[in-house]
Image (tube, rainbow, N blue to C red):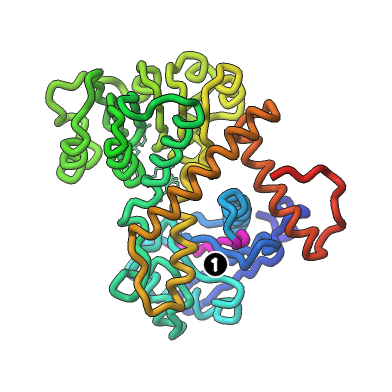
């Protein structure tokens, strides 16, 4: 970015950008607080050699919409450290970054996990500032909430799927499911969808796809993943092997793309057979394809509604920083199910009512919530638009 680049700034934010550096360790990083109308800025902390101010600003904005979409009272923020997380100097750089932001943390920002940071790094951050409140995502042994390990995001994706099926008055029991990807998110999604009585007929990884019309054994898939990782698709006996991507077009009621972005384009959207699509991944459906799916009557639960389980868990993690009582995974699962089910239905209903895609409906809902908060707190003049939430 050029030194005078405000291209990522608009009326929503960012409210504050702090860039920091340290010549001794070579640390260079940034904190972006996007919009705090609904609460203090909260979002993960990323470490990557390619971090830019623009990238972190965009991610901070995504957090503004995510928190508003899930209707929890935090604002958008994100932090980034431009450094290789595999370097042996990682800890020294992380400590330098955290020290440099000690005026902002934890009052204006609390560190969290994103690409390149682990639970142990969250513990290092707490240690560096001598404050358990400085980071979320620390290990359970330190009172943290390891929601990634608990598969909370994937669990929420499954609950959003169940809500969409109920909304469409389609039975979940016996419904066929195709999932794309078999990573952290899908493992938990498949587990929960299996509990709900669905039949998982196909899964894929970057190594290939497998299809069994009578249903795959989900527990065997999970066990195979633990041994072979993405190569699990080569070890499922009796299942038909397909090329990556072919699984999207299989006969199924439910499709959960949870791997990459832009995998469903207009052509795929016209051809796929699912009646419910729940976005586990971020941005798996192109905007044009979203319109095609809406025209075809496919119920789509958008990414920042369906995969917001981690965000709900992060809110619990924020509370846990100041509590002596450990948070139990079941407590979070109940809250995630409740909130994501309600949000999914709200968005599906708003989309049907206003004749727009669910993505447009979700974004409108989030924007409206932030705008109202800005109006009520006197940040902007009241809008005379009709308020419908
Ligand atoms: N982990 C979370 O809590 C979380 C939260 C919100 C959103 N997401 C999003 O969900 C998606 C998956 O995240 P994850 O944590 O499960 O990642 P992961 O790295 O654990 O797993 C990704 C999986 O996708 C597979 N894959 C990659 N390219 C593929 C392709 N073209 N076709 C089929 N499979 C392919 C990989 O082989 C792997 O099995 C990402 O888009 C991520 O941004 C994750």
Foreground residue among 103 and 359: 359
* Residue 5 appearing in the image: no
Is any atom of residue 282 visible in this view? yes
Give how far across and how far down residue 121 sits, in percent.
Answer: 37, 70
Q: How far from the left and from the top, in percent, is residue 72?
A: 57, 58
Q: Is residue 330 left or right of residue 40?
A: left
Q: Which of 113/191 is in front? A: 191
Residue extent of the magenta highlight: 73-83
Q: Give the residue displayed 39% in from the left and 26% down from the top.
A: 171
Q: Is residue 81 magenta?
A: yes
- Say left or right for 257 vs 100: left
Q: Quadrant of the N terminus?
A: bottom right
Q: Does residue 127 lie above or below 273 as drawn? A: below
Residue 95 quadrant: bottom left
Quadrant of the rendered image containing residue 291: top right
Q: Quadrant of residue 176?
A: top left
Q: State the SS at label 1.
A: strand
The answer to whether residue 352 is magenta is no
**Residue hosting label 1:** 29
């Amino acid at each position: 970015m050029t030194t005078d680049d405000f291209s990522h700034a608009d009326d929503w934010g960012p409210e504050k950008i702090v860039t920091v550096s340290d010549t001794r360790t070579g640390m260079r990083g940034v904190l972006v607080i996007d919009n705090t109308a609904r609460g203090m800025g909260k979002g993960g902390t990323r470490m990557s050699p390619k971090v830019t101010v623009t990238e972190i600003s965009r991610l901070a904005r995504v957090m503004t919409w995510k928190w508003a979409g899930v209707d929890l009272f935090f604002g958008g923020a994100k932090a980034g450290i431009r450094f290789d997380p595999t370097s042996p100097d990682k800890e020294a750089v992380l400590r330098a970054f955290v020290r440099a932001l000690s005026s902002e943390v934890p009052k204006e920002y609390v560190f969290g996990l994103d690409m390149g940071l682990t639970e142990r790094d969250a513990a290092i951050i707490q240690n560096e500032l001598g404050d358990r409140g400085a980071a979320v995502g620390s290990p359970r042994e330190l009172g943290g909430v390891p929601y990634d390990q608990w598969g909370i995001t994937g669990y929420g994706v499954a609950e959003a799927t169940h809500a969409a099926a109920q909304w469409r008055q389609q039975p979940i029991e016996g419904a066929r499911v195709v999932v794309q990807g078999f990573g952290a998110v899908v493992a938990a999604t498949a587990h929960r969808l299996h509990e709900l009585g669905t039949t998982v007929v196909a899964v894929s990884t970057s190594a290939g796809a497998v299809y069994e019309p009578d249903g795959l054994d989900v527990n065997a898939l999970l066990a195979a993943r633990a041994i072979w990782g993405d190569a699990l698709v080569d070890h499922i006996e009796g299942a038909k092997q397909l090329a990556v991507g072919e699984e999207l077009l299989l006969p199924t009621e439910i499709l959960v793309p949870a791997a990459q972005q832009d995998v469903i384009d207009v052509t795929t959207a016209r051809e796929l057979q699912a009646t419910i699509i729940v976005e586990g991944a971020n941005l798996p459906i192109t905007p044009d394809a979203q319109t095609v799916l809406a025209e075809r009557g496919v119920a789509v639960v958008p990414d920042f509604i369906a995969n917001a389980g981690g965000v709900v868990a992060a809110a619990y993690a924020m509370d846990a920083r100041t509590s002596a009582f450990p948070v139990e995974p079941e407590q979070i699962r109940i809250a995630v199910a409740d909130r994501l089910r309600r949000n999914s239905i709200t968005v599906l209903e708003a989309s049907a009512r206003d004749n727009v895609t669910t993505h447009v409906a979700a974004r409108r809902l989030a924007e409206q919530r932030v705008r109202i908060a800005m109006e009520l707190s006197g940040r902007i003049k009241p809008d005379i638009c009709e308020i419908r939430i």
